[in-house]
Image (cartoon, rainbow, N blue to C red):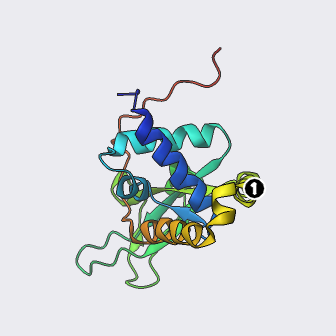
Amino acid sequence: NMYIDLEKVTKMEEYIELLAYSVVKSFYPTALIKYVDGLTLNEAVNFLKEYVEKGKLSSVVEVKCNEEFNQCFRNIVIVKNLEDAQSMHLHCDICGKEVIATDDNTFFKYGFVEKYEELMREKFKKKEEYRTDKRKFKKDVQNAVRVAQTAQPINITGCNITVANSDQG
């Protein structure tokens, strides 16, 4: 359902803003799911896709080693899109396996567009509640970072992504 309730949307916006302020450079969509109660993967991915279209976030594809026998899962490469990864000759430097980028071992990750990061820093400098309660702000940011760092990669290629086309209108 495209129409997510406003509470979830507000919570997602809050999370992205806190992360943009933090030292975190990129995160998995599962971070949002951990942060926002009752959020589905589809809702998270759609929201993130909108942020990419608005120029606030950029998305990258992470290719992992899918050597199951050794449970390797090492990050091999981060590229702009799946096509780039599929045209590359990849090797895992840990288990030595040749890695082919497929739907099973590629994961989306989102990073911040620099201009957006700057705008968020400015915004928080001006925010009254955070100026008066610096401890709360620090705690909120730390919590956002912890969520991002413990979120697991998840395969979203099968995701039913429904985003209104921004070109129309």
The part of the image, by quadrant, that contains residue 21 is bottom right
Locate residue 163, reporting x and y percent. 49, 29
Considering every residue shown, the one lying at the far top of the view is: 169
**Who is closer to the viewer here, 16 or 105?**
16
Disc 1 packing (10 Å; few <14; some 14–19; many ≥20): few
> Which residue position is annotated with label 1?
126
**Who is closer to the viewer here, 151 or 39?**
39
Write the residue at 37% across / 48% down: 156
Write the residue at 69% across / 64% down: 131
**Who is closer to the viewer here, 145 or 128?**
128
Instruction: Indicate whether 82 appears above or below 7.
Output: below
Instruction: Indicate whether 7 appears above or below 141.
Output: above
Write the residue at 38% across / 51% down: 36
Locate residue 143, reporting x and y percent. 47, 69
The part of the image, by quadrant, that contains residue 19 is bottom right
Considering every residue shown, the one lying at the far left of the view is: 69
Q: Is residue 78 left or right of residue 21?
A: left
Locate residue 73, reporting x and y percent. 36, 73
Locate residue 30, reporting x and y percent. 38, 56
Q: Is residue 133 left or right of residue 161?
A: right
The part of the image, by quadrant, that contains residue 80 is bottom right
For badge 1, the amino acid type reads Lys
On-image quarter of the C terminus: top right
